[in-house]
Amino acid sequence: MRLSYTGPLPEMVGFLLLPQYSMMAFFAAVEPLRIANRIANRPLFDWTLISADGGPVTASNGMTLMADQATADVHHLPSLAVCSGFTPEAHLTRPLMAWLHQLDQAGCCLGGIDTGAFLLAATGLLKHERVALHWESLPAFRERFPGVDTTDELYELGERRFSCAGGAAAMDMALEVIARRHGAKLAIDVSEQLIHDRIRARSDQQRMALVKRLGTHKRRVVEAVALMEQNLEEPLSLEEVASRVEVSVRQLQRLFEQELNVTPRQWYLQLRIKRARRLLAETDLAVLAVGLACGFNSSSSFARSFRMYYGYSPRQVREENV
């Protein structure tokens, strides 16, 4: 799904399905291509499902799809989308790495849907590339691959690489591909068939505005939460947060309790604990390193806060995949 395509039609797109992949993101990428074929009344796109051994693959929702081919049987593709789930690198083997490099050398455009970019980065195939990821996965990816440029935009389309945030963003990326290949009119018609009221631009925000997420229009609460979200590795003191939003600490306390039913300190701690949970699940960073990346000065304070919030320890996430 590169920027431009001059090969024969139908354009073939491969989807590598890895265990626990996101089925919604996969279908969101495929369905626009199917509908484009129907509206155009000719085969513009085709796709093939690939698994490591050619066998069926179970998605994160428990549903299973049959693969068309095994990786060993695929030697050339115009484009390949890697579809994975919450622990992408758990399924990265030496044969899979070698296969991805072989496709790359053969001219294949490689991309990641949702967390698929983790595998491509771990394989060394995202150097000098800009990568779009789901907002929840961005902190883990940046910790794991600090040398790879990332963005929280919906998707990225390049000549040899593509990526998207997953979910409905895969649909927007597919619609953009259709528009570039076969015209904006067809993309709009496909979007209307999907009851997708508009084709979102790449730069559209992934997340709802804070006002909608928080359910409050109180400007100082929204600004304070934004500051907290931007400063998780080196947390600001409540005094500094209050000062930056131009209220006293006591006023900040009262606003949070009125609007969010929680103290600002508790809200800030929850943000850091939730980020730590994602880093533990999606990276191989040491537990202490995860704690430090989320603003905890010691492993004991991190473990204590984590257990109080979740009811189990950080190490259990690693050992038991809680």
Image: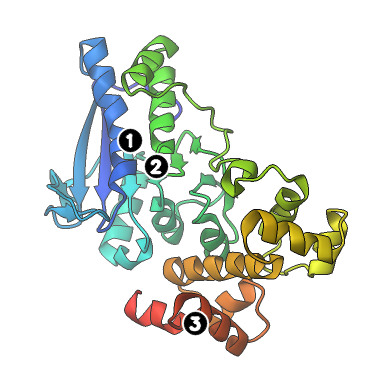
Quarter of the image holding residue 177? top left
Q: Which residue is drawn at 52% across and 63% down?
A: 140
Callout 3 crowding tier (Cα within 10 Å): few <14, some 14–19, many ≥20: some
- Nearest to the eye among marks 3 and 2: give it: 3
Callout 1 crowding tier (Cα within 10 Å): few <14, some 14–19, many ≥20: many
Residue type at tag 1: Ala
Instruction: Report the front residue among 97 and 155.
Output: 155
Q: Residue at x 44, y 13 (%)?
A: 184
Give me the C-alpha separation between circle 2 and circle 1: 7 Å
Q: Position of residue 301 (x, y in %)?
A: 62, 86
Q: Position of residue 134 (x, y in %)?
A: 48, 49
Work out whether mark 3 precedes mark 2 in sequence or the reverse, and give the earlier one.
2
**Disc on res. 28:** 1
Q: Please report contact status of discs 2 and 1: CB closer than 8 Å, yes or no.
A: yes
Q: Please report contact status of discs 3 and 1: CB closer than 8 Å, yes or no.
A: no
Q: Which residue is drawn at 39% across and 17% down?
A: 187
Q: Please report contact status of discs 3 and 2: CB closer than 8 Å, yes or no.
A: no
Q: Would you name the residue on which mark 2 appears?
A: 167
Q: Which residue is drawn at 43% across and 61% down?
A: 122
Q: Would you name the residue on which mark 3 appears?
A: 307
Side of 292 where 321 appears, left or right:
left
Quarter of the image holding residue 230? bottom right
